[in-house]
Image (cartoon, grey):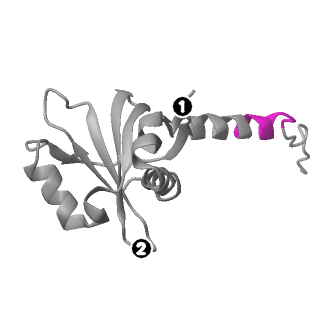
Amino acid sequence: MTYTDVFPEKRSPSGGAFVFIALLVMISVATITIYLQSHATSSHGDDAVQARNCIQNNGVWKVYQEPKPRSNIYHWLCMDPKSSTIFDMIVEKLNEMTYQEKTAFKPKGGRWESIRRWLEMGENRGGSWVNPPQGSFNLIPPP
């Protein structure tokens, strides 16, 4: 007895489109939106631009969450891989995937030990180190 394919194997013509759309949805879910403010560049100039570029290109290295009552304020630290300079983008969390930039700059000459002491011993004393955000960043320029 020989078996034949009564129902030949067919691929759905829309199967590839479904996979593509699913990938787009997953990517957009993992994108963190940051609304930039003009204060950073007007006050800190090129340091603000470098801080933003560092976050965009390298992600967030370490995060310091300010103490209560300002616990929705975070210092996103980024280390430039070429120079080991550390930049700080201070952001306010609006929701899980949306933040508003307060400012961006190169604190304490961009040196880690000076920045760590500044955060842990200064006016933000009592905050905590938390896990950095994962995913890509969508920087929205000021209006």
Q: Quadrant location of the C terminus?
A: top right
Q: Residue at x 37, y 71 (%)?
A: 84
Majority secondary structure of the magenta segment?
helix
**139 left or right of 81 in image:** right
Q: Residue at x 39, y 43 (%)?
A: 43
Q: Tell whether position 17 is magenta.
A: yes
Other residues around mark 2 within 10 Å, as few (<14) / some (14–19) / many (≥20)? few
**5 left or right of 109 in image:** right
Please say if 77 is above or below 34.
below
Foreground of the two, 54 or 12: 54
The part of the image, by quadrant, that contains residue 77 is: bottom left
Q: Secondary structure at mark 1?
A: loop
**Segment tinted magenta in the rendering:** 12-19
Q: Which residue is mark 2?
A: 83
Kind of residue at disc 2: Ser
The x and y percentages for residue 136 are 52, 46
Q: Secondary structure at mark 2?
A: loop
**24 left or right of 121 in image:** right
Q: Tell whether position 135 is magenta.
A: no
Q: Residue at x 88, y 37 (%)?
A: 7
Q: Are marks 2 and 1 in contact (CB under 8 Å)?
A: no
Foreground of the two, 52 or 42: 42
Kind of residue at disc 1: Pro
Q: Which residue is mark 1?
A: 142
Foreground of the two, 21 or 43: 43
